[in-house]
Image (cartoon, grey):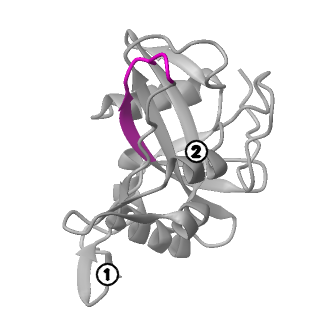
Amino acid sequence: MAQRRHQYERAFEAFLRARHIPYVAVNEARKTLLPESARLTVTAGEEQRSLKSFDFVIYGAGTNLLVEIKGRRLLAPTATGTGRLESWVTLDDVESLRTWQGLFGFGFEPAFVFIYRCDAQPPDGLFQEVFEFEGAWFVLRAALLEAYVRRMRTRSPRWRTVHLSRSDFERISHPFAPARFGLEGDPGPGLPVFKPLSA
């Protein structure tokens, strides 16, 4: 397993490996994809910004995902519900993923994978994808970039962040890869079905 800086990325990589889903961790591959002198930029209004890297290329049946991991904390459930599933990202995330989609071309879809670290094991039935990693519990939700962009609203102009309302996030986010692993439901509109590598 690659040495990844953030626990959320390491946890997601463990999730992929346990299910034999084919992927490339971008931090390992980026130096071979671009020449040393390359400085890719993205235009944000009149400003040029460095192109932000994403985290994983994940290979699916017909569609491949360019995945940006968004790690968030999920507080212990209360009597009134599960707590808020934070869905905020930066405009740099959005603009960079769109640029990467253009660079990769046909057959690649950008997506956010929100991975929530839970204070305690979530109750059965609240999430379809629950797993343990390094003594902590995690749950996943995935959203394709274009579905996210259609519903995003400004969270902080100063910090250039956007987010979704709770109802919009529930509408467009889906389990990441349920169809091949005995979970009910499908991966959601546009999300590929992953064919596991042979064990």
Q: Is label 1 in contact with label 2 (beta carbons under 8 Å)?
A: no
Q: Could you say whether the residue bearing mark 2 is in a helix, strand or loop?
A: strand
| Sequence-first tag of 1 and 2 | 1
Q: Where is residue 37 in the image (x, y as percent from the top left)?
A: 24, 73
Asked whether 102 or 148 is in front, the reply is: 148
Furthest residue toward front: 80
**Image: 25 above or below 159:** above
Q: Where is residue 86 in the image (x, y as percent from the top left)?
A: 41, 42
Q: Distance between the residues labelled 1 and 2?
A: 25 Å
Q: Where is residue 23 in the image (x, y as percent from the top left)?
A: 57, 42
Q: In this view, does 7 lie to the left or right of 85?
A: left
Whether 72 is among the magenta residues is yes
The amino acid beneath tag 1 is Ala
The amino acid beneath tag 2 is Ala
> Dot 2: few (<14), some (14–19), or many (≥20) neighbours within 10 Å?
many
> On the rendered image, what quadrant is the C terminus found in?
top right
> On the rendered image, what quadrant is the N terminus found in?
top left
Q: Is residue 195 left or right of residue 52?
A: right
Asked whether 98 or 115 is in front, the reply is: 115
Q: Could you say whether the residue bearing mark 1 is in a helix, strand or loop?
A: strand
Query: Residue 148 occupies which quadrant of the picture?
Result: bottom right
Which residue corresponds to mark 1? 44
> Dot 1: few (<14), some (14–19), or many (≥20) neighbours within 10 Å?
few
Question: Which region is colored magenta?
Answer: 69-80
Which residue corresponds to mark 2? 142
Q: Is residue 2 visible?
A: no
